[in-house]
Amino acid sequence: MTWLLIALIAQIILGTSVVFDKLLLKRGFVDPWVYTFWFGLLGMFSFLLLPFGAAHISLAAIPVALVAGAFFIAAMLCVFLAIRKADVAGMLALVGALSPIATLTIGSVLEQQFLGFGDLVAFGILIFGGFLFFITEKKELRVTVFLLALGGALCFGISNVLTKVTFEESNFLAGFFWPRMGGVIFALALLLIPRIRRRIFALSETASMANRGWYFANRVYGSLGSFMVSGAIFLAHPALVDATQSMRHAVIFLAGWFLLKERAAGLRLIGKMSATACIAVGLIALGLVTYAAALPVDPHRNITWGVTFSDQYSRKLGLDPVRDGISNEAYWQANFNAITDELHPKKMRVIAYWDDIEKDRGMFDFSNLDWQMNRLAEKNIGAIIVVGMKEPRWPECHMPAWTREFPNELETYVLDYMEETVRRYKDNPALMAWQVENEPFLKFGLCAIRPQQAVEREISLVKSLDAMHPVMVTDGGEFGLWRRAIKAGDIFGMTMYRRVYPPSVGKYTGIIDYPFSPSFFRFREKLSRWLTGEYEKPFIVIELQAEPWGEVEIPLLSYEKQIKIFSPDYFRETIQYAKDTDFDEYYLWGAEWWYYAKEKQGDSRYWDIAKSIF
């Protein structure tokens, strides 16, 4: 958060300094060219930094630093010329809106400096606030003034990016000192133009001592702001630092009102107040994103890796029983055994599929789940059993076909099946926890959102039958609201996906990458714990994407398309991404697919990566 605090203080200083500049220009102290000359020449005071190591920089970086400083003074010349011809608040707002865009664009092209999604949202809000300030001005924008503003913005953009490059090649003091020298050279170069040289000497001689004193005092004051901006650029992305200059507009608006008597009324006043509010929202958003990015990650924490296993899904991926001489039943069991015997996960989530267990009303067949739980107990692998109407894997709802004949009794029948399941496995040595429903409050799949009262009834039933094991409730990590799921269970589980095919809009967007960084999850956890008061409740990633998600189910996708969507390198990146979210327990989603890739496609890369994880 340090850079943001520094940047905001700097913008307050620079905003009030600009108002003082406007006062001096109105008094006719000097014209903008003379003003710029002295502005650049005062950079010579940076020589005071030399004893502290300001000269330590590589030879290759010196020209970059000098150019950065020259472009900064050129930008200030454009600003001084513009505010002499137009309202100070309007011109600074226009330059302040265009300059960060220029910085971001130039930085992206020259240095591949990109913003994360959260930063980009906050950046956009701040820029919008700047434009809103500008369009509320009552004066007509002349072409000359607009070109000056645009030129200033481009020069600021180049200067900001090159200054960041300089900082990357030097220490902070050197990165501050050498661009100032570039500004001094630019100012001295103005003396080579006879017309400008005459104006500098003539107006400097006629200026009153009082005005000179105020000018130099304001330059010292403004230099403090510039120094702090450099410090912020040293610490953060230059486009974000530049975007904080929107803060200046509010300062200039208030200072201009009281000092320059630049009054606003009616719609114009409403516009300025709205722009100020917009900038405040942008700064708060930027602060939250910056705070989230600064949340610490413990690289040495003990991480537990588990998997989810779906026997239904494994059957879908199973070998052709005619071609391969093996039944799908034997295939999914071989899949399960390979996971436990070769990968050695610490924990596994298994699913009590209602449509498998109670194919006929009142007739329960637990043979598949019995087999899985017995194997887990033998291998000393902890188990989470999912029970309910809404369970993992498409189509998400797994009610037996016969329940369609009894829609009004559905809630009663699901409780009957859950009771049978809980009674059967509550004393199984492998059991660690129950998961009641899967993302019950999230609209996904061919399922309605489960009513909260229904979920509460199911949880109460499970707890009444088994007081020894905790109950987990899950929600979508990216778009779920979390609060109800957190409050409902003893453990909160979330999904974590990065590359998806959105069912509702996928035909328009295709496969997309979610723009969320690991800090998004770190921040959501902190915020959710604060909002719910659940500071000790376990938060786990119950579904970490480790398989492709395409426009159709995996068995219907070509294998080439599958590995294009989710390559081995992307698998490794996803694991690192997950580690950076700072949770302690992750259940990978896709173990059946790794086995399918190895056994059916002859591609063991995913299986080998999983081995290294566990």
Image: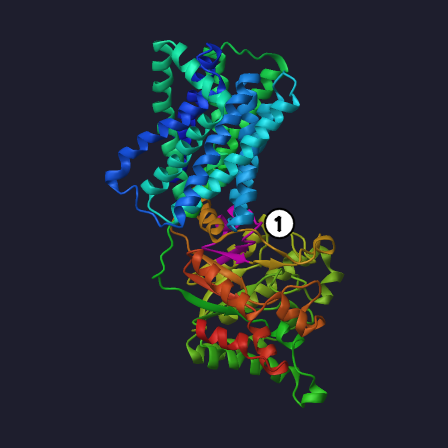
Provide residue 575's location: percent of width, then percent of height. Answer: 48, 64
Quarter of the figure with the N terminus? top left
Q: Kindly indicate the quadrant of the structure image that contains residue 594.
A: bottom right
Which region of the structure is painted magenta? 472-496
Q: Is residue 479 magenta?
A: yes
Mark 1 is surrounded, within 10 Å at the Cα level, by few (under 14), some (14 to 19) or many (20 or more) other residues, namely few
Color scheme of the displayed model: rainbow
Residue at 44% across / 67% down in the picture? 305
Please tell me which residue lies in front, 35 or 112.
35
Q: In the image, 206: left or right of 510?
A: left
Q: Report which residue position mark 1 lands on.
A: 451
Please tell me which residue lies in front, 44 or 394.
44
Above or below 343: residue 77: above
Provide residue 391's location: percent of width, then percent of height. Answer: 60, 62
Residue at 46% across / 9% down in the picture? 27
Q: Amino acid at mark 1?
A: Pro
Please tell me which residue lies in front, 456 or 328.
328
Residue at 70% across / 84% down in the picture? 320
Is there any visible trace of residue 46 in the rendered image?
yes
Q: In the image, 323: left or right of 68?
A: right
Above or below 334: residue 487: above
Q: In the image, 401: left or right of 463?
A: right
Quarter of the figure with the C terminus? bottom left
Provide residue 545's location: percent of width, then percent of height. Answer: 55, 63
Q: Is residue 409 magenta?
A: no
Q: Kindly indicate the quadrant of the structure image that contains residue 503.
A: bottom right
Q: Secondary structure at mark 1?
A: loop
Farthest residue to the right: give it. Answer: 405
Provide residue 386's location: percent of width, then percent of height. Answer: 55, 64
